[in-house]
Amino acid sequence: MPAVATHHTANGAFDFAAYYLKALDWSVATNDVYLLQQVSSPTCAACNRSIAGVRALLASGAYETGGRFDIESVRAVTGNFKIRSEYVFEAVTRDQAIVINRPSASPSTVAPALSHDASLIFVSWTRDGWNIVGVGAA
């Protein structure tokens, strides 16, 4: 994690959101949720769904391939949102298709490639530093 992402500043929040995206991409690439767990608030419903989904796949002997993404842009946004946070960032990514590989079946594509996928990342400071408190569609 970049050092500035550990500071309770607007720049720290921005760098932390960018780090979250890299941690998410790493989790997709490796089917390992460790980094996601480190940056996610226990109350982040989207984070918990992602972590539980990867764990369920692995427990069944399946794994995900594809799904990697390139970050096109990250920018701060303002507005009224259902998720309360200190900062909100819009991330635009270019996503690969997500394929699930199961031991007893042919691989299946569960999500198509997206050339311009936008999502919102909700970030708040706690005594432990920045945390992702929500992720949702833009």
Image (cartoon, rainbow, N blue to C red):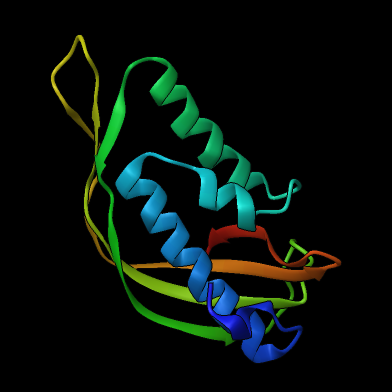
Question: In the figure, residue 6 lies in which quadrant?
Answer: bottom right
Residue plotted at (69% across, 50% down): 44
Q: Position of residue 55 (x, y in %)?
A: 48, 28
Residue plotted at (63% across, 90% down): 11
**Residue 138 in view in this figure:** no
Question: In the figure, residue 40 lies in which quadrant?
Answer: bottom right
Q: Nearer the viewer, residue 81 or 26?
A: 26
* 114 to the left or right of 120: left
Q: Considering only vertical position in the picture, is 95 above or below 123?
A: above
* 76 to the left or right of 92: right
View extreme (front): residue? 3
View extreme (top): residue? 104
* 96 to the left or right of 60: left
Q: Position of residue 20 (x, y in %)?
A: 52, 65
Residue plotted at (59% across, 82% down): 3
Q: Nearer the viewer, residue 116 or 128?
A: 128
Q: Position of residue 82 (x, y in %)?
A: 75, 62
* 119 to the left or right of 28: right
Q: How many marks?
A: 0
**Residue 74 in view in this figure:** yes
Q: Considering only vertical position in the picture, is 119 above or below 4?
A: above
View extreme (right): residue? 127
Residue plotted at (80% across, 64% down): 128
Q: Position of residue 138 (x, y in %)?
A: 51, 68
Q: Considering only vertical position in the picture, is 105 above or below 6?
A: above
